[in-house]
């Protein structure tokens, strides 16, 4: 059994705090542009969410420091690109954050798959992974749009900037992940179509796997009658 010294001042319960940060990020980010300091609010929320992700998965010292190692170039690249875009291209930041999010997803999935029983932490971890999948593909779409101009077609009837911004990419990602498909944004390049198809399949498979895992864990939990002491 691990002692408290083997931890780095955090616990697995912080997964709930990470989920709260994710929800705040998704809700507040589109409204941040309405304020004068909106350009600072979005990267600040993203930075806070990434830090909370490290706290959520860093219950082991090795995992914690590896997450910090991946986080540092991600955060530095994001803020350098924000203030001095000529020094750091979006490709650097997007590549780093894709690696970081994928690392967090792997750690949370490992936590879900080895958990002995269903509790609030498992539920929060499952929801967090689903939201992270949407965020992961959102940044991947931004990277593709940057590397392959014209990779996405925007409906000309929409009175909005016809570019793959951070909010637009996340919006398209979750529309694809949930297989809704409004048709206002269409992937036309081969790599963009491949990503969209892979995300749609991942969203469906993840929900099926998560439900089956939770049902399996719940069925193994002792019932209330079995917990009663026998006379």
Image (spheres, rainbow, N blue to C red):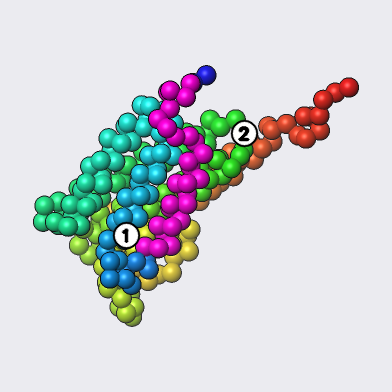
**Quarter of the picture holding the C terminus:** top right
* Residue 153 visible in the current orientation: no
Pick out the residue farthest to the right: 231
Q: Main secondary structure of the magenta part?
A: helix
Residue 21 rendering spot, x and y as whole percentages: 43, 52
Secondary structure at badge 1 equals helix
Q: Please rate how many residues cluster around mark 2, counting C-alpha atoms within 10 Å: few if below 14, some from 14 to 19, many from 20.
A: some
Res. 213 image quadrant: top right
Distance from the alpha carbon under mark 2 to that under mark 1? 36 Å
Q: Residue at x 22, y 52 (%)?
A: 79
Residue on which the image places disc 1: 42
Report the number of discs.
Answer: 2
> Which residue is rendered at x = 31% and y = 76% of the image?
160
Closer-to-camera residue (222/52): 52
Q: Is residue 71 visible?
A: yes
49 left or right of 161?
Answer: right
Is label 2 or label 1 in front? Answer: 1
The one of 121 and 173 positioned closer to us in this rendering = 121
Magenta residues span 3-29
2 and 1 marks in contact (CB < 8 Å): no
The numbered mark at residue 117 is 2
């Amino acid at each position: 059994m691990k002692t408290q010294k083997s931890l780095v001042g955090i616990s697995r319960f912080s997964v709930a705090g990470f989920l709260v940060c994710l929800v705040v990020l998704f809700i507040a980010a589109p409204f941040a542009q309405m304020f004068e300091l909106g350009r600072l609010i979005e990267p600040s929320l993203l930075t806070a969410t990434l830090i909370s992700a490290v706290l959520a998965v860093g219950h082991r010292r090795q995992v914690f420091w590896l997450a910090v190692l991946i986080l540092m170039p991600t955060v530095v690249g994001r803020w350098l690109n924000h203030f001095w875009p000529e020094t750091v291209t979006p490709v650097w930041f997007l590549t780093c954050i894709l690696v970081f999010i994928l690392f967090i997803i792997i750690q949370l999935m490992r936590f879900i798959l080895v958990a002995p029983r269903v509790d609030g932490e498992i539920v929060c971890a499952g929801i967090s992974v689903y939201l992270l999948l949407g965020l992961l593909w959102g940044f991947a779409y931004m990277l593709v749009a940057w590397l392959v101009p014209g990779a996405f077609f925007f409906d000309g009837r929409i009175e909005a900037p016809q570019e793959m911004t951070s909010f637009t990419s996340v919006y398209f990602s979750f529309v694809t992940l949930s297989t809704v498909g409004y048709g206002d944004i269409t992937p036309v390049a081969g790599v963009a179509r491949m990503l969209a198809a892979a995300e749609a399949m991942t969203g469906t498979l993840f929900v099926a796997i998560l439900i089956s895992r939770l049902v399996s864990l719940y069925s193994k939990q002792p019932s209330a009658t079995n917990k009663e002491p026998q006379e």
